[in-house]
Amino acid sequence: MSTPELVTVTIDGREIQVPKGQGLIETALDAGIEIPVFCYEPRLGARVGACRMCLCEVEGMPKLQAACTMTAQDGLVLSSAQTSAKAAEGQNAVLEFILLNHPLDCPDCDKGGECPLQDLTFRWGPGSTRMRFAKRTFDKPIPVSPLIALDRERCILCYRCTRFSETVAEDGQLVAVNRGAGSIIATFEDEPYRAHFSGNVLELCPVGALTSTTYRFRARPWEIQNVPTVCGLCPVGCNTWATTREGKVARILSRNHGEIDEGWLCDKGRFGYAHLRADDRITQARRRVRRRGFEPVAWNEALDEAERGLKDAGGPVVVAFSGGETVEQATAIARLVKEGLGAGAALLPDTFHPGLDRFRAPISAIRDANICLVFGDEPVVERAPVLDLWLRAARRGGAAVITLNPAGTVALAPGSAAWAASELRAESPAAELRDAKRALDEAERVAIVWSEDDETGGSHAVALAEMLGDKASVYFVPRTPNGRGVAAAWGKPGAVPAGDIGVLIVSGDEAAADPRVREAAERAQFVLTTAMFESEATLWSHLVVPGTSYLERDGTTVNLEGRPQRQRRAVAPPHEDELTFFAQLAGRFGVDVDPWPGMLPDDHAELPAQDETGGETAAPKAPAPNSRGKGLALVRYRSLFSGAAVERVPQLQFQRPAAEIELSHEDATARGIGGGDTVTVSSNGTSRTLRARVNRRLREGVARIPAEHAEGLQDRVEVKGG
């Protein structure tokens, strides 16, 4: 990379050399000078100069200038309000104007004590008001969504929220309407703000205009503690602050890791903490008793029952992981089974090819790529939402983001990811991939995102990266938050034996959703389950040990790029955690396991080598042509807002996917179906009534349905209008 040209800038008499074109707000900070701002936020794209709080005097210009809209140029001389009386007068006037109709209700406002307007008024404001008339008021609060409330009289029209909606999340749902003094913030067509990242506007708002309905009037800044931790609800591993009050989690805030999340959080990570207070939470161990169902047992009795069950049950041991365990917890289970019980097999939620380690890169590197190839039928935003924001940032930066799926920029048949990756390695790929191949050959930096369930662990992505060499980075997106760390902790999963199983250990609520686990439970003599909530899995079990949330335990988690991070306990669980249980249980079998996490690894979790049958064993088959007479190929995807945690957060229920079926324009027209129509979807004797949504980018012959609304449907479905 070329060295940036340096220019000399003078700010408040201090001469400083900075790269040409750098923003003056950053330049002032480099000189140790603060210029107050409200609307300025470097993550939101182009500066708009809306609030005028950064007014400064610039030599050679007759009027005060908004510093946030200017860049460093050689010889520029700037005076801030700290040294210029003219600039100070301008800033005082701006603050006076902002406070003209702003309510002075700081003791009641949720932002009080954490409010930039409050802070800057004390530091830079006039100290008293000349206005004696009544302030303007609005109805309040305005329900922007079940998660967000708007107090319009507090809004200073900095446009941070609308700029986020327009230029970062690109959902376009939050807008400014009317003009001049009548301008207000509203949602498009007054619909609820229903988007994956809506909660970010709560942190962006520099006043108390946008507030969280789950935190509103529940705590004051001097009553809370903020615990640094890592989100455990998806594989991105966003850095967060868990705000606690009186031993309970009150809210989640972003902690801005520049290489992972850039300070953004999805709504699942921001609001999902409420599952800690679920009514059906399991708080005490219990064991099965014949003719009486289950009975509660004390901690030591649970250990006795587990020891007895593991010793008495003859046959192999199988562990079903959820992928949400910490590395230490998975390691404790692995050592118990392998060292204490002799051997065992594992049902891992995700498989990883060891070649992925050769193409590791920070998630933020996606933004700097020339080409982003996104493989897989599963939408990235549903698996790893913040990864989708990085792809959008790459597109805004000029990168070509090529999605290869039934609704992608290259519309392929379902299940074509492996075939497409193989074709892109060929000299003469299939016709629909030739443009992508040409762009790939010309690119200097390539990001490969693999969002597909893959038994080979991303071997086709690795093979494509090997062909591209050093210019490629690979982001294999697992289904689970710590699937990579769990896979590294266990090692080679081994084959689940046929016939009877001696012991089945079901670790976590999400493991029970795997149909392989249900089948194994039917063959097991003793089933030990750790779970937070009541479910079908707890009914299978002989012993149920209460589980914990990621907010209630310490340990290591590994994100999709292979980066180990430390989760810290924000609140104490109502019982001991799973690591303590398995460490104590392992001790009864002569295995010494630490019941606490160790030091964070310096590098990353090593992925296990593939079995002899792993890896890329054969060239993938070409996608099948459309078969109109045999119905539509069904593509299921699991929504981000699904799973045991989200199901127990009432405020998030509106975010869950509607009972809809996506149809291509061609298929909808052929069946006389319009958007919003009620349709009947059937296959193999099962039928469902859904609402149709026409997607003009969807490939003909394909239908897409969220997994929670596709239960019982087979791979091909018939669709008929109502």
Image (spheres, rainbow, N blue to C red):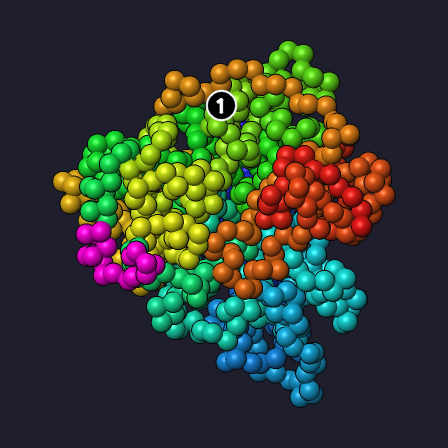
15 relative to 149 in the view: left or right? left
Q: Quadrant of residue 276?
A: bottom left
142 up-or-down from 11: above or below: below
Residue at the spot 22% in from the left edge and 58% down from the top edge? 299
Number of numbered tags placed on the structure image? 1
Residue at the spot 70% in from the left edge and 42% down from the top edge? 682
Residue at image mark 1: 459
Residue nearer the viewer, 695 or 53: 695
Residue nearer the viewer, 95 or 517: 517
207 relative to 700 in the view: left or right? left
Q: Magenta residues?
A: 289-305
Can residue 574 be seen at all in this image of the molecule? Answer: yes
Residue at the spot 52% in from the left edge and 39% down from the top edge? 364
Q: Quadrant of residue 368?
A: top right
Structural crowding at the residue carrying mark 1, measured as other residues with C-alpha within 10 Å and reported as few (<14), some (14–19) or many (≥20): many
225 relative to 655 in the view: left or right? left
* Image x and y of residue 105, in percent: 56, 81
158 up-or-down from 641: above or below: below
* Image x and y of residue 230, in percent: 41, 50
